[in-house]
Image (spheres, rainbow, N blue to C red):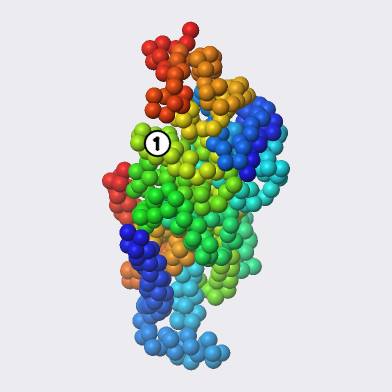
Amino acid sequence: MAVLTAGGIRTRRTRAGVLTAALLLALGVALTLAVCLGSVDVPAREVWSIVGRHLTGGGAGSTHDLIVWQLRVPRALLAALVGAGLGLVGTAVQALVRNPLADPYLLGVSSGASLGALGAIVLGIGVGGALGLTVSAAAFGGALGSFALVWLVARRGGGFSPLRLVLSGIAVGQFLGGLCSYLVLQTGDEQQTRGVLFWLMGSLGGATWSQLAVPAAAVALGGIALQARARALNALVLGDETAAGLGLDPDRLRRELFVATSLLTGVLVAVSGAIGFVGLLVPHLCRLLVGGDHRRLLPLSALTGAVLLIAVDTVARTALDAQEVPIGVVTALLGAPVLLFLLDRRQENR
Amino acid sequence: MRLALDDLHVALAGRDVVAGVHLVAEAGEIAGLIGPNGSGKSTLLRAVYRHLAPKAGRVLLDDRDLTALPRAAAARHLAALPQERGEAFELTVRQMVALGRIPHQRAFAADSAEDRAQTASALDRVGMAGHAGRRFAELSGGERQRVLLARALAQQPDVLVLDEPTNHLDIRHQVELLALLRAQRATTLVALHDLNAAASVCDRLHVLAGGVLVASGPPREVLTPELLAEVFGVRAAVTAHPLTGDPLIAFDHRAPAA
């Protein structure tokens, strides 16, 4: 029996290792494909030679240089960063609210971030200004505020139930979404309204190299901060009393997680709008594959999110000839059926 | 080690739910905390394992004040088995027990050989070594409680604190868990609902009513018909257990105490 279980552990660990390797490979393939495909298809060999030349300090050469290096590579990298960020945020939020089917989108946090970002845009601070830091900061403020509001509403009366939390998240999210729509109508010209609407639905269009720094820093810092608390997350999921008995401070931990997830959500929403379902489904699927230990779950969710979002963005960009579909629309169309399937599965488990 | 609560006060929403409790569990002794619902048992225990901050008073381990220690340091001395049942998500039995090592670990460090050895030994001591790879969520109620006890043991504590560990277990699993608890020979503070179980298992009983201790002593001295009528509101006779000689309470289930 002891031998059997030792074998069981080894297969689990090996599985996580194999999965990580496979995902890293998939990440490379997805990045390459995303840069190859589009209105003009560029062969992979040419893509790599262009990227190689830029990385070694060479200048532009090939005819496709502009498309590859200035448009598609930054966009694919942004998709990877946003996907990784959504995977991390989803994992953290699910532990925070002890609900394996939660994400910042469902809990109204994305709406808060959108409202903050929109406010900054409408007030005329502009999307491009100062590396988008102002918009990111406003989105962070909005995310933190809405997260706190949802939490307070859900905790009223002292009790805590996941259902209450999700319901209050939906209420707050709808309310803030209404405010967002109002703000959109207040934007000056039709062109800007259309642009803002497109961004609200989630879009990675118009990604530039200069836009990558803020989300890259946020994902790296957020990822490290969360990974440092991976064991604590394992305990927090079981309850505050359990966490306290293990020498943790659940209230402080929750405050730290609030800040980390709001920061990540704010930055992600500022660069890509509200992209739903990724943060919800990715951690859930990863948990089915490697189990509930957050030390494995966090990095794996980040990787899976990155690969998934690159793939989805490529589809959103190339599915229709004439125009681009907002990526949030594609994740919703794909994510909703998967969520229903998972709900069904949970019902059967009870 | 000896656990002592010194004039412990715990307030919830401005009300003193625990109001000045003095209680001692001698080294290696099982101290039972009994009392009717709402008497403050769980609140008292939560303050001992630092889920709640006491309003006043001290929790002493020998001569050291636990509440003055950093949380992780306190958790290396005292482990808890609370009543809550959170979502286990997808943790395995071994991962659940390994959580007991958290107070001994640093943020990014991998599990040490010592961590793995203590986890394995704890699983072994509760007879769950053969189930280490199973999902915690698929265990039976009795198995879960044994695993949670193992998690507490993996903390290598000097003192165990348990809040009604036999709740919702069938009689066989209650007996198994309490036997395991006795076998640890650790200083233990345990809240128990079942007074007959408390009478058999505990070295001393402490009776809590309305947030204050109304009686303390060996089960034989504490569990009198008068106390049972006054504190618990039931009519009962106390005899000797025919098999063990422990006090045996025979309740009158037909009517409460006059």
In the picture shown, does residue A321 fall above or below A186?
below
Residue A9 appearing in the image: yes
Asked whether residue A121 appears in the rendered view, the answer is no
Q: Is residue B89 left or right of residue B56?
A: left
Q: Residue A153: x and y, percent?
A: 54, 38
Kindly indicate the quadrant of the structure image that contains residue A279: bottom left
User: Looking at the rendering, in which quadrant would you find the N terminus of chain A?
Assistant: bottom left
Residue B221: x %, y % from top left: 55, 22
Q: Nearer the viewer, residue A90 or A212?
A: A90
Indicate whether B94 appears above or below B37. Answer: below
Residue name at image x 67 percent, y 32 percent: B8
Residue drawn at point x = 36 percent, y = 33 percent:
B171
Q: Which quarter shows the C terminus of chain A?
A: top left
Q: Label 1: few (<14), some or many (≥20) within 10 Å?
A: some
Q: Residue at x 63, y 28 (%)?
A: B18
Residue type indicated by callout 1: Val
Mark 1, residue position: B175
Residue A196 relative to residue B215: left or right: left
Residue, x 48% and y 40% (percent of image)?
B182
Locate residue A317: give its quadrant: bottom left
* Of B87 and B204, the residue lying toward us: B204
Q: Secondary structure at mark 1?
A: helix
Nearest the camera: B57 or B192? B192
Q: Chain of mark 1?
A: B
| Residue B189 position within the rendered picture, expressed as x and y whole percent measured from the top left | 56, 37
Toward the top, the furthest residue is B258
Count how many numbered circles sit on residues in the image: 1
Task: Give residue A56's position: percent from left, percent from top.
Answer: 54, 90
